[in-house]
Amino acid sequence: MRYGINRVFALVATTALLALPSLAFAAENVRSITIISKWGGLSFKPVPPEQYVITFADGRYSANGKAIDMRLVQNLMIAVNAPVLPEPQRENMGLTESWLGTHAESALATVHEPNALPEQRALFLRTFRDVNDVQQLLSLVSKPYTHTDDYPSIRVDIVALDGRTTSVDAFSQAPLMVPWQIKSGEHANETWNADIGRSIGALLPAKFLNAYLLQGETLEPRLAEVVMDETQTQWDILGAESQTHGLIAEPGASYRLEEAKVQTAYNDDFESSEQYEIENSSNFFSTLSRPQDPPNFKLYFVALHAGRDASPPSPITVDSYAQTVLGVPWMAKFIHQHPEWEIGIRIVDGRSLSPVGVERFARDMQQAGHPELIDRVRREAKDIALLMTERGRWLVFPDHSAILWRALDFDRPCWLGLKPESLPEHECEEGYNNCPAVRVSSSGRVE
C-alpha cells in the first residue's frame, strides 16, 4: 500500500511539472524585466505606449533610478512558474468569501441604484456575497472582451542572466488582465492565473498605463455589473410589485411570471405617442408563460399607467388567443421546431389587437397600397391575435389565416420561416418599418 501511495505522489508531482511553462530560472537569475503597456480604442488623441524597465545591477533591482524590492520580482517569477490554470479560479481571482462580504455594499453603489427598494438591495447583496453564485458568474467576470471600444494590452519580457527570454502577454479588458500567454523557448501556454497580473501591477507605478487593471481596481465594479445583470429580471419584478397594487400576485397558478417591469414607455399598437406625451405615465410590461404551451411561446401582458384599474389577463381570453395561433399548423410547427426563438401574443386592456393598433394597421395599409385589408381587420379586431416575433408583427385570424403586418428585417424568426426575398415590401407610416402586407392561408400558402 505504501508503495502505491508513493507512486501516486510521484505521478502528481510529474503532472504538475508538465504543466509548468518550462521557465528554468528564478528571481535571482533575472537580468531585466521590460514591461510595455498599450491601449487602443476611441480617444480624442492617440494614447502612446508606455515602457517600464527593471534591471539588475550591483546586487539589486531598480527602475528609473528607484530601488525595486526583490520580493516583488520573486512574486512575478513564482506566478509565471506556477502550474497552468486552464480556467479562472474564484479564490485566485481574489473573490474570497471575506472579500465578497467586505465589498458588497460599495459594489452596490457602483451600479448607481440610489433609489433601490430594501428587497432589491437584499437581492443584490445576497447574490454578491454568495460564493456559489459568484462561482457561477466567474466566466463573465473574467471575460477578456466586452462590448466597449477598449483594447488594453501588456507585454513583459523577462531576460535571464544567461540571455534566455520568457515573454508574458495579455490582451484583455478583464480585471487583472486574464488570461495570460507565456512563452519560453519552444514552450507556450495560456493560463488564467490572476497572480501574474497582480505581480506585474505591484512592480508598476500607480499611474502607469493599464496599471489599474493589473492592480485589481476593476474587480469590484466588474463583479457588481455582472451580478446586476444576473439579477436584473428579479430586480425588475420586485420593483414592479411595489408599483402595481398587487397586480403581479393575482395571475396565480395560471401563468409563470418570467419578466415584469414598470417603465416610462409606450407602444404604437396599444397606446399612441400623443397619449404618452400628454400623460407621461409609466406602463407595466410583463412576460408570462403557461405550463401547457411550448416553452418559447409567451404572453406579453401590458397594463397601462402602472396597472391602475387593470386586471390580470383572463385565462379564458388568453386560451382563445393562444389557440388561434397554435391552431395554425405551419405556425405551430415553426414554434416547436425553433425553441431558441421567443414568440408570443400581446394582451392589453383585455384584448390582443387594441383599438389603437387597428388604426395604426389601417394607416399602414393605406400607405402600403392595400386598403382592402382594413375592413376585415376592423370587423374581427377583438378576435385577432397580435403575434410578436423577433422584429415582426403578425395578425392571426380565428380561421387561422394570417397577415404579416410589419417586418423590420429579413431574419427567419420575423417571417416565421417564409422566404422574404420573394415577397413584396412596402414602407409603413413614418418610413421606418417594412410593411409587406403578406396574406398567408391557414395551410401556409402565400396568397
Image (cartoon, rainbow, N blue to C red):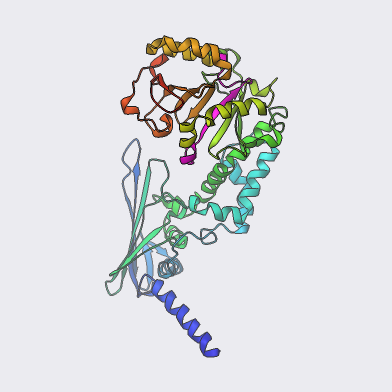
- Total numbered labels: 0
Q: Quadrant of the C terminus?
A: top left
Q: Position of residue 260 (x, y in %)?
A: 61, 33
Instruction: Give left or right: position of 364 versus 385.
Output: left
Q: Nearer the viewer, residue 139 or 164?
A: 139
Q: Quadrant of the N terminus?
A: bottom right
Q: Quadrant of residue 249?
A: top right
Compared to 152, does 86 lie above or below?
A: below
Rendered residue at 51%/51% (across/down): 219
Q: Nearer the viewer, residue 234 or 202?
A: 234
Residue 409 visible from this viewpoint: yes
For the question of whether residue 313 can be seen, the reply is no
153 horizontally vs 224: left or right? left
Residue 302 sits in quarter: top right
Nearest the viewer among 220 and 9 is 9
Residue 50 image position (x, y, % from top left): 33, 51
Residue numbers of the magenta segment: 335-355
